[in-house]
Image (cartoon, rainbow, N blue to C red):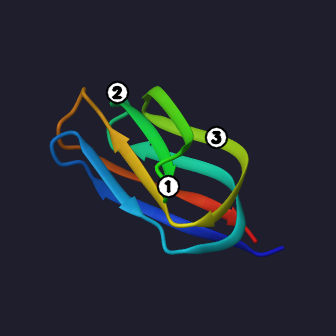
Amino acid sequence: MLIAPIEINQTASGGAWSFNTLKISGAYLSHILVVAAAVTTTFNVTITDEKSNIIYAEDGITGTLREEVYIPLRGIYTIAVDTSSVADSTFTGRLMLEE
């Protein structure tokens, strides 16, 4: 089993950020880690497939999202974070894929 990370290092502009993954050819999303620079930052995370289907959504996270999941992936995905508590905040983390 091969484990590959997708690193996250984004700064929200106007309270939101998003990015697209490269094309994924058959893998499982096994771990989601998103950490706000400030532990008091509240945010929402969504992962959407190329057909605009939301495959993962978590609202009202404060500080850190650490989630173990098992979601099959194939194609290009958009990872998005929005926050109403802080307009410009930095986020780090990673998504772990199992191939």
Check contact, mark 1 vs mark 3: CB within 8 A: no
Task: Identify the image quadrant of residue 2.
Answer: bottom right
Q: What residue is shown with label 3?
A: 67
Vertical side of 9 occupied by 66: above or below = above
Say which quadrant the C terminus sits in: bottom right
Q: Nearer the viewer, residue 82 or 48?
A: 48
Lower position in the chain sequence, tag 2 or tag 3: 2
Q: Residues within 10 Å of mark 2 (few under 14, many from 20)?
A: few
* Amino acid on which the number 2 mark rests in the picture: Thr
From the image, tell me which residue sits under label 2.
40
* Dot 1 amino acid type: Lys
Say which residue label 1 marks: 51
Q: Compute the Cα span from label 1 to label 3.
A: 24 Å
Residue 6 position within the rendered picture, expressed as x and y whole percent measured from the top left: 53, 66
Q: Earlier in the sequence, mark 2 or mark 1?
A: 2
Which quarter of the figure is the N terminus placed in? bottom right
Would you say 58 lies left or right of 91 here?
right
Q: Residue furthest front?
A: 51
Q: Amino acid at mark 3?
A: Glu
Residue displayed at 32% across by 57% down: 10
